[in-house]
Each structure stands twice: as structure tokens, then as C-alpha cells.
Image (tube, rainbow, N blue to C red):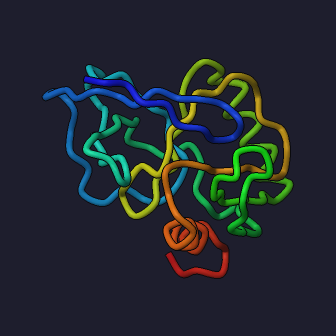
Amino acid sequence: MERRALLILAVTSLLGAGSARAQQAADPADGFYLVAPEDHEAAVRLVYRGRDDWEFVHPEALMSFAEVTRTEVDTDDLTEQVVVRVWLSPAGRQRFAEITAAHVTGRVAVVVDGVVVTAPRINEPIKGAELQISGAFDAEEAGEIAARLSPRTER
């Protein structure tokens, strides 16, 4: 299977391949999930948004979107790509820094409505209050993603 690159949080990630051993998730909660090896017994297989592909994640979210304080659709100045900017509360920033520090070289999937939006590789702990999610989506899709992450949206 051809591997494709995706930019998010200024890092690249590789998309996963399939496995018959993984479970199919019915409707996982929105949140940040650790990407699992495709042969991991508890892995949950989720569709990768906008692609004829899927990703395998651990069944429990590392963090929900409850710590998201604000979202905004924007354009990255460097790449001119549509992005979703996400701001975290102080507690969310600390939790996300702990998660990314514990899983450097791993990958974290952003799951919205049971679909993987993106799954970047963690190259280093991410300690800032602002995250940037980018991918192969247009402004309308970015708006939908931002709305799902937004604290003003009922989940």
C-alpha cells in the first residue's frame, strides 16, 4: 500500500495499513487517541477521513476535547494550507505535554465523529497552548472539524 504524508503540528506522519485482527469501532468518543500497531489485539480500526484508508488506535482516548477552549479556521502562512487552530486550557496544555512526552516517536490520532482526522508522529513533547491541525481538507471541512472540537458545540 502506498504511504502518504500528512502535515500537522509541523510534523509528518505515515498512514497505517490494514489488519484483520483489529476490531471495528462502532462509535468511539471524540478525542486524542494513541495509534496502535495494526496487529495489536485491542486495536480499533477507524476510517481515515477523506481517504480510502484506515488507522488503528488504542480503544481508550488519551484526552477528550473537554480541555479545548477555542478553535479557529485559518490559513498557514508558510504552506498556504487551510488549518484548524486549537487552543487548550492550562490543564489541557499540561495533559497534552505529558501525553506527547510519554509517546515521543509514537503517533496520536485526532478522532472526530468516529473518524480519524489526522494522526501525526510525535517528534517531541508539545508544550504550547495552541495546536495546529492541517491535512487534505478545504475551508468547509476545516470549519466542521473546528466546530466538533469547539467547546461551544454539544458533543
Q: Residue 34's x, y, as percent?
A: 50, 34
Q: Which one is in front, 152 or 86?
A: 86
Q: Which one is in front, 95 or 105?
A: 105
Q: Residue at x 36, y 22 (%)?
A: 37
Counting the numbered discs, the total is: 0
Q: Residue 42's x, y, as percent?
A: 29, 31
Q: Residue at x 40, y 35 (%)?
A: 58
Q: Residue 87, located in which quarter of the rendered image?
A: bottom right
Please give left or right for residue 91 compared with residue 14 in the image.
right
Q: Residue at x 35, y 46 (%)?
A: 48
87 w.r.t. 128: above or below: below
Q: Residue furthest left?
A: 20
The quadrant of the image that shows the N terminus is: top left
Q: Residue at x 81, y 43 (%)?
A: 94
Q: Which one is in front, 22 or 13?
A: 13
66 w.r.t. 31: above or below: below
43 w.r.t. 48: above or below: above
Q: Residue 100's x, y, as percent?
A: 69, 31
57 w.r.t. 27: above or below: above
Q: Residue 80's x, y, as percent?
A: 70, 52
Please give left or right for residue 90 compared with residue 88 in the image.
right
